[in-house]
């Protein structure tokens, strides 16, 4: 196969565009700056990057906006640094697929939300040119909100097809928008007439059959999640979207179900095998960047809040019912942890049950114990270095047994004390915690199909966010919005999040 001919940039068709660095472009910039509609430009340009792959325009645009908003990704990029990069934006679509096919409007919006941003998106048939102008003026006049446009290049007489780029500013007198094109190897930043940009957005994406549009991305006023988040990195979100949209409504049609335990039993038994993969516990512990082994004050406070929220989950009546349902049906380690849970979690559960059986003097009774919670910690042993200790609470009927057991690990490489998650106590929610949170996070409209009115009222009282502590309520509403986005991705539709009042 012959090698592809190389290219060095393209000549920007002008008109209709005005190159940013031209004399006319400089004049437009100066006048827009004077009028106050370039407020967000400097934050964007300070972190601006060129897309690293021909199909990464969406990921590059989002990276720029997230970094401009100073949103902390909560995980490392390279070295000790936490920073958004295209390579980290993989929670809604595998990078290899994006590299080959690009990313759709819906999934980019979903990605922005999963990355911790507040997102409002509008397809061209969900808005008007007047609405778009209003939103652009507001975002261009603020440093706290940025606009990404999804458009086709053809109306600008440019080569190529669909494209994403941030909009860096607006000139009211000339009614022009400043496109900060992330394909800088192809076209420089340029001003375009706003009506023409609207025309370019009001085009159909052949991949979905839906119109393009624009999205407004801003920071949340508070951290969106401390303990739980939706993970779409594997295929579990597809089966869970089907479960929420199709399976649950069918299950609720069964009129023979007339009590809450029976209803919960049906719901839990029908969950996809990989349901636990959808909702992940946020376990990363951020160390002091100075290289110390201790936690920063900020992270110590976060860990306290995490433990508090986890306890709030376990204090709900719903948790008690789900726990009883699983405990009476299954042995400990399969009741508390699925087969694809973290291996440390399964080890801890098994170790605690064996320890409880040992302490009660009946080694044959370990299967009668259910491990309610576990954690790992490291202890210093004189002359022998750090050792890993599993601490937990094993339950058998009404009896509880606290257990501390030293793990007999033969090599340092396999020790939790020498892993990235070492040196501090790390608590792991059980499968019961995850299932409880999942049921709480499903939208209230999910349960309108329950036929028995008495049962419906009783169940709705169990899953109502009104009875939750404020911290847990915020977690549940955050997950509820994420599940809404996951469902929208399955339909390739994307709307505003569900109201926070529910």
Image (spheres, grey):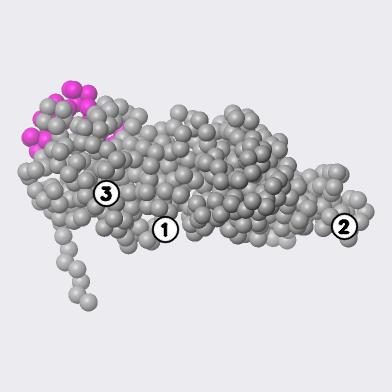
Q: Position of residue 244 (x, y in %)?
A: 53, 51
In this view, the residue in front, 21 or 214, is 214
Question: Dividing the picture into quarters, in which one does residue 357 lie?
Answer: bottom right
The residue beneath circle 2 is 365
The residue beneath circle 1 is 94
Q: Residue at x 37, y 61 (%)?
A: 97
**Left or right of residue 439, residue 69 in this image:** left
Looking at the image, is mark 1 or mark 3 earlier in the sequence? 1
The residue beneath circle 3 is 211
Dominant SS of magenta comes to: helix
**Left or right of residue 176, residue 207 in this image:** right
Viewer-nearest of labels 1 and 3?
3
Q: Secondary structure at mark 2?
A: helix
Q: Is residue 484 above or below residue 5?
A: above
User: Distance from label 2 to label 1 (Cα)?
Assistant: 45 Å
In this view, the residue in front, 301 or 439, is 439
Q: Position of residue 11 (x, y in %)?
A: 10, 51
Q: Let me know if residue 147 appears in the view.
A: yes
Q: Let me know if residue 53 appears in the view.
A: no
Q: Secondary structure at mark 1?
A: loop
Q: Residue at x 29, y 51 (%)?
A: 210
Residue 267 belongs to magenta span: no
User: Distance from label 1 to label 3 (Cα)?
Assistant: 23 Å
Which region is colored magenta?
21-46
Looking at the image, is mark 2 or mark 1 earlier in the sequence? 1
User: Distance from label 2 to label 3 (Cα)?
Assistant: 62 Å
Question: Dividing the picture into quarters, in which one does residue 189 lie?
Answer: top left
The residue sitting at the bottom extreme is: 1
Looking at the image, is mark 2 or mark 3 earlier in the sequence? 3
Q: Secondary structure at mark 3?
A: strand
| Mark drawn on residue 143 | none
């Amino acid at each position: 196969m012959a090698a592809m001919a190389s290219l060095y940039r393209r000549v920007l068709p002008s008109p209709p565009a005005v190159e940013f660095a031209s004399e006319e472009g400089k004049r437009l910039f100066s006048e827009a700056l004077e009028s106050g509609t370039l407020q967000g430009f400097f934050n964007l340009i300070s972190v601006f990057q060129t897309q690293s792959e021909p199909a990464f325009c969406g990921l590059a645009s989002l990276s720029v906006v997230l970094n401009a908003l100073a949103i902390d990704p909560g995980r490392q990029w390279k070295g000790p640094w936490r920073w958004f990069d295209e390579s980290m934006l993989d929670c809604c679509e595998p990078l290899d697929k994006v590299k080959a096919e690009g990313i759709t409007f819906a999934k980019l919006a979903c990605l922005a939300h999963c990355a911790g941003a507040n997102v409002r998106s509008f397809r061209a048939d969900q808005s008007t040119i007047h609405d778009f102008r209003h939103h652009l003026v507001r975002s261009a006049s603020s440093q706290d909100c940025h606009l990404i446009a999804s458009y086709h290049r053809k109306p600008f007489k440019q080569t190529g097809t669909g494209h994403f780029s941030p909009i860096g500013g607006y000139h009211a007198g000339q009614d022009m928008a400043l496109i900060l094109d992330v394909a800088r190897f192809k076209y420089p930043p340029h001003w375009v007439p706003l009506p023409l940009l609207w025309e370019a957005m009001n085009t159909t994406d052949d991949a979905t059959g839906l119109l393009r549009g624009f999205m407004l991305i801003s920071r949340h006023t508070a951290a969106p999640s401390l303990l739980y988040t939706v993970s779409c990195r594997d295929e579990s979100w597809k089966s869970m979207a089907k479960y929420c949209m199709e399976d649950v409504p069918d299950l609720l049609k069964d009129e023979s179900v007339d009590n809450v335990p029976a209803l919960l039993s049906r719901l839990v038994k029908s969950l996809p095998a990989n349901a636990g993969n959808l909702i992940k516990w946020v376990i990363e512990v951020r160390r002091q960047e100075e290289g110390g082994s201790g936690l920063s004050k900020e992270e110590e406070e976060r860990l306290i809040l995490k433990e508090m929220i986890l306890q709030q989950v376990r204090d709900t009546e719903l948790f008690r019912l789900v726990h009883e349902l699983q405990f009476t049906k299954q042995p400990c380690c399969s009741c508390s942890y699925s087969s694809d849970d973290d291996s440390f979690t399964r080890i801890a559960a098994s170790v605690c049950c064996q320890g409880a059986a040992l302490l009660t003097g009946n080694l044959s009774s370990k299967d009668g114990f259910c491990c309610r919670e576990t954690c790992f910690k490291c202890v210093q042993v004189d002359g022998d270095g750090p050792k890993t200790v599993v601490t937990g609470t094993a339950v058998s009927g009404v009896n509880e047994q606290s257990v501390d057991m030293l793990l007999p690990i033969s090599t340092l490489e396999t020790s939790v004390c020498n892993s990235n998650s070492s040196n501090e106590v790390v608590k792991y929610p059980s499968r019961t915690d995850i299932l409880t949170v999942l049921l709480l996070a499903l939208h209230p409209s999910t349960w309108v199909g329950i036929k028995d009115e008495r049962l419906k009222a009783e169940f709705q009282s169990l899953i109502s966010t009104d009875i939750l502590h404020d911290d847990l309520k915020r977690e549940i509403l955050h997950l509820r919005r994420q599940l809404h986005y996951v469902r929208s991705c399955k339909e390739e539709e994307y709307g505003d999040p569900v109201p926070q009042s529910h």
